[in-house]
Amino acid sequence: MIIHRRTLLRGLAAGTAGVLAGPEFARAALAASPEPTRDVSYESWNGIAGLARGTAAGTALGLAGLTIRRPVGTITYTDPFVGGSRDYEYATWTSPWVFPGFAASQAVTSWNATTPGGTWIQTELRGVTPAGTTTKWYVMGRWAEDDTQFSRTSVPGQRDADGTVDIDTFEAADGTGLRAWQLRLTLYRPADTRQTPTVRSVGAMASLLPEADEYPTSTPRRAKGVTLRVPQFSQDVHLDQYPQWDNGGEAWCSPTSTSMVVAYWHKGPSPADYSWVDPGYADPWVDYAARNTYDNNYTGCGNWPFNTAYAARFGLRSFVTRMRSFNEVEQFIAAGIPVVVSAAFKKGQVPGADYSTNGHLMVIAGFTRDGDPVMNDPAAADDPSVRKVFGRPEFENAWRNSSGGTVYIIHPATVALPRSPHQANW
């Protein structure tokens, strides 16, 4: 059995989306909202125009993004993994309220940022429940680009009556959800320095999904016969390498898949970046990606937004969302954008996959003329064996019923995304 990361699924769903401000206004608006009819939405704030819609406390906006202008406070943070304490100054940015049009049972945040010189960022999410309760702020991640001065981590132990955070995913308590949500960014720098993180974008996917097996199988529409030239990297060639980062290649499906898409765009770390990797190891950029996506609390490299944040280090735009079917994935392939997908299945369940997994990341690189997905599957003995074809209905159902259709979208700013659907999930 291949074990890579947990999978997540919940619910039924949705209605109409909007972005407004103020928890009191949020509760009043929700009281008058119609019965929901939709189930997946994604909202983000990008660049100067997008981030200007939020509320700043000590942050400033420039061409590069959101930075610390004048700190509003200082904390002492003790690193729970390497020990030692350090004082940090901080400033914050808070998003407008978002109304997805349904009571979201799950939410995943993602961001694009840089964190030089020991700086780091924290993302938080709160919401308004159907009962009108405003939840506490849940920490969705404490992140830095590398691990030389700060231990990148998710935060355990956040469960209360409204919900919890499972590594990278807010999960509402049974019988409730988020009818509105809001994000908060906190930018930290070592005290008495002039360093600053720079955040270029931040957003969140919120969803409420049908129960398993309630999805119809999609009919191929676009991208039939289209296969993108995505480089092929095997995770298995990294077995036993650097076991301090999630047991070596055995569990490196996520950073390996992310590396394939980053390389597709002719981006990635330089030889100087991964000079610490044993020169006898193949594809050393995968070892580098594993180290720089590693979540110290999860003790794994499969934290979804940590992977998209890693891709963004190379000037790419990236985020985590969910898709409703392969018809949406087909639009990305037709636009020249490969898609990283998360799925779980049993051996023999998916034609073309000869193993079991309770959570695996791989790349959809295209579709055959019959509409079957052409996969770059890192669970392969070597790089040439990475390319596979999976059965469409079986894999589509495994993907949607296990992770809810979770994907990483990674692309340059110069390559436009397909037009989003009416209920925008990108």
Image (tube, rainbow, N blue to C red):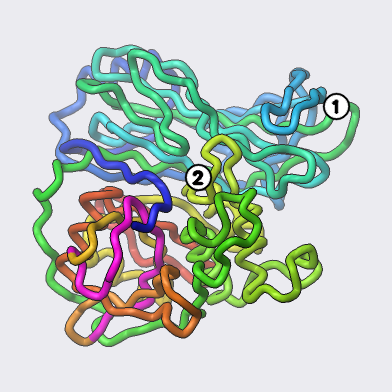
Which residue in the protein does label 2 denote?
Answer: 110
Q: Image quarter for residue 337?
A: bottom left
Secondary structure under tag 1 reads loop
Which residue in the protein does label 1 denote?
Answer: 191
The picture places residue 236, in percent across and down from the top left corner, at 50, 69
Residue 73: give its label: none
Out of 378 and 128, give the one closest to the viewer: 378
State which region is magenta. Answer: 349-368
Are the residues flagged by discs 1 and 2 in contact, CB closer than 8 Å? no
**Is 389 placed above or below 239 here?**
below
- Amino acid type indicated by mark 2: Ser
The picture places residue 73, in percent across and down from the top left corner, at 75, 18
**Is 73 placed above or below 330 here?**
above
**Is 104 placed above or below 248 here?**
above
| 209 drawn magenta | no
| 356 drawn magenta | yes
